Image (cartoon, rainbow, N blue to C red):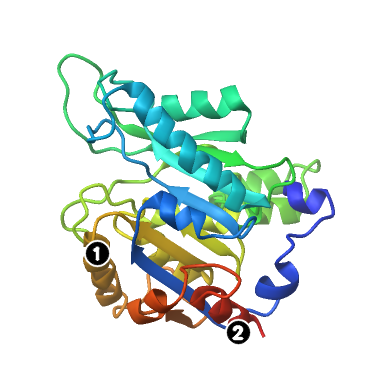
Amino acid sequence: MNALRKAGKTHRSDEGLAKACTETVHAVIVADCLELLKSLPDSSVQLIVCDPPYNILMADWDRHADYLSWARLWLDEAHRVLSDTGNFVIFGGLQYQGEAGSGDLLSIIHEVRQRQLFNLVNLIIWNYPNGMSAHRFFANRHEEIIWLTKSKQYFFDLDAVREPFDEATKRAYMKDKRLRPESVEKGRNPTNVWQIPRLNGNSKERVGHPTQKPMAIINRLMKALSYEGSVVLDFFAGSAVTTRVAMELGRHSVSADLSPDILTYFAKHMENRREPDLLGSRIPHRLLDQRALNAHPVFGPESALARAIATAAE
């Protein structure tokens, strides 16, 4: 049972968006993460998915402390826009490089824990079989994902991501009188170690982004940590795969990246969607064009996106 249901509470937007969502609305834009976040209202987002830049040198990052100062800004804004039952997942690696102007996930975790900004629910290990070779250390075959929440009353739908037991295991469990048959039928908890291959060069999902995440990972996160009609945000969107998955799962989404390439990548996603959907979309979606976004704030009480979402919920 998830923490939200156990507490007998519902997300404040359940009465509007999630209860009668007949259409989802999406925005894919070129924008600085801080400018985007500052345009969003308080407690407006159910799930934030992001893969921040690590181990790169920027003009304004002369020291590791500069990277952390920048990270504090978007962590604070993410905390503000996240709903009380919302979830925040960050991709990264724990290996600290120690170079000027660089950072890693370990830096982010330390910052979060030191300031008690979020609750750390899980460290998820994404294990993949393929990767770079190494000679001076063990070859890396995993990436970490931290799952943070704003409060202890977070939304979590375990049943949406359970893995089925094989038939032999199911038969054995059915004989165990201590277990309820309906629990066995639901399947098992997928644990916090996820064995999902990285995208190879020939994958139909590929849109050209060098570090594109598989849809299967975003799919599992989105199913477990958000619900139909809720808003999903990715402010380091890269390939825009978050919006692609949100379209399939009936969530509203905002994806932004500083690079204009995000628009090219997203166009490729839309070309790929002409083939049979990999996840099975059930709710129609609408993409706000750049003209509508230029005429209004990206998201706010009177924005094009907010009004479109409100209309979809009517």
| In this view, 184 is above or below 282 | above
Label 2 crowding class (10 Å Cα cut-off): few <14, some 14-19, many 20+?
some
Label 2 residue SS: helix
Q: Residue at x 74, y 46 (%)?
A: 153
Considering depth in this image, is 92 or 26 the residue closer to the camera? 26
Total tally of numbered discs in the picture = 2
Measure how far apart labels 1 and 2 are at the Cα level: 28 Å
- Residue at screen point 44% across, 57% down: 36
Q: Nearer the viewer, mark 1 or mark 2?
A: 2
Q: Is residue 293 above or below residue 209?
A: below
Pick the residue in front: 36 or 149.
Answer: 36
Mark 1 touches mark 2? (CB < 8 Å): no
The quarter of the rendered structure image containing the C terminus is: bottom right
Residue 265 badge: 1
- Disc 2 marks a residue whose amino acid type is Thr
Q: Residue 43 sits in which quadrant?
A: bottom right
136 relative position to 110: left or right: left
Q: Find residue 6 and name its label.
A: none
Q: Residue at x 61, y 71 (%)?
A: 301
Toward the top, the furthest residue is 136
Residue 131 picture location, percent across and down:
22, 35
Kind of residue at badge 1: Tyr
Left or right of 264? Residue 50 is right
Q: Secondary structure at mark 1?
A: helix
Mark 1 neighbour class, 10 Å CA radius: few under 14, some 14 to 19, many 20 or more: some
Residue 170 in the image: state x and y as whole percent.
Answer: 62, 49
Residue 311 marker: 2
**Residue 180: in sight, yes or no?**
yes
Can you give x and y, in whole percent of width and height, for residue 230 in the image?
60, 65
Q: Vertical placement of 166 versus 252: above or below?
A: above
From this viewpoint, is residue 206 visible?
no
